[in-house]
Image: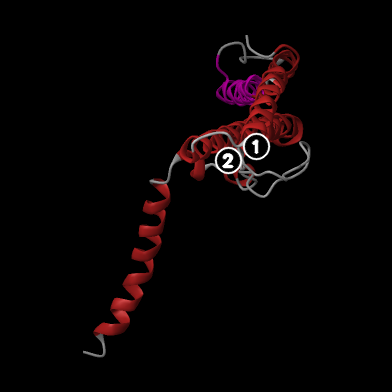
Amino acid sequence: MTEEKPAKAAGQAPRKQKKQKERRRHWPALLKRFPRFFWRPREDGEWKGDWAVVPPEALDEYKTLAEDLGVWRDQLESRFRKLDHRAQILQNQFWRQRVMLIAGGLAATSLATIQAAIGGGIVVLAVLQSVLTGLLAGLTVLIRSRRAQQGYLTARLKAEQIKSEYFLFLAMAGEYQGAGREARLQQRVGDIEAEGVS
């Protein structure tokens, strides 16, 4: 009997973690990806959640490709990271704007509901609701003019295009055959950064 208890306790820890992950997966999208309100990271800095496109150990493991793998690390990774970080910042900004609109709309609706439930005639509630509705209208115009979603999509697309071009370079596919491959890659990445979508 006593031998079974430690085995049960050891088996319960992974089950609890699995249940917590399953619960989080079923949260509403608004809560699952809730924006950070006071998040001001630098685009060109190193971030905690950055994952390596080309892990450092790959240079030792794949000797034949070491020179081509070094091109990513030395010339392209910082350019990719800057666009990747910009996309994440703009995505968070877009989500933050949407949450503000949702919360403001909820508050305005709640004020109208209270006014209706009481029977109307409360000037303070009517003024608060009209001021809040006017602020929401102004905020909506401001949000549209900033175009955070378009900026996020453009930055994400540019980052993924750079990665895609690098993988074509690594595979020596298409225009990346023969001499001058690295110069063509640099030219293509410069075009992507300057123009965006091709």
* Above or below, 194 relative to 109: above
- Do the numbered discs 2 and 1 sit on residues whose CB atoms are within 8 Å? yes
Callout 2: SS: loop
Residue 181 in picture, x, y percent from top left: 68, 17
Which residue occupies the extreme left position in the image?
Answer: 1
Q: Residue at x 65, y 21 (%)?
A: 158
Q: Is residue 26 among the parts visible in the rendering?
A: yes
Q: Residue at x 65, y 28 (%)?
A: 130
Along the line of sight, the residue nearer the viewer: 76 or 67: 76
> Cα distance, mark 2 to mark 1?
6 Å
Quadrant location of the C terminus?
top right
Q: Residue at x 56, y 12 (%)?
A: 174
* Residue of label 2: 62
Residue 149 in picture, x, y percent from top left: 62, 23
Q: Residues within 10 Å of mark 1 (few under 14, many from 20)?
A: few
Q: Residues within 10 Å of mark 2 (few under 14, many from 20)?
A: few
Along the line of sight, the residue nearer the viewer: 90 or 157: 90
* Above or below, 124 relative to 137: below
Along the line of sight, the residue nearer the viewer: 28 or 21: 28
Left/right of residue 19 with respect to residue 44 in the rendered view: left
Judged by its main secondary structure, the magenta piece is helix
Left/right of residue 106 with respect to residue 37 in the rendered view: left
Which residue occupies the extreme bottom position in the image?
Answer: 2
Residue interval drawn in magenta = 149-173
* Residue of label 1: 66
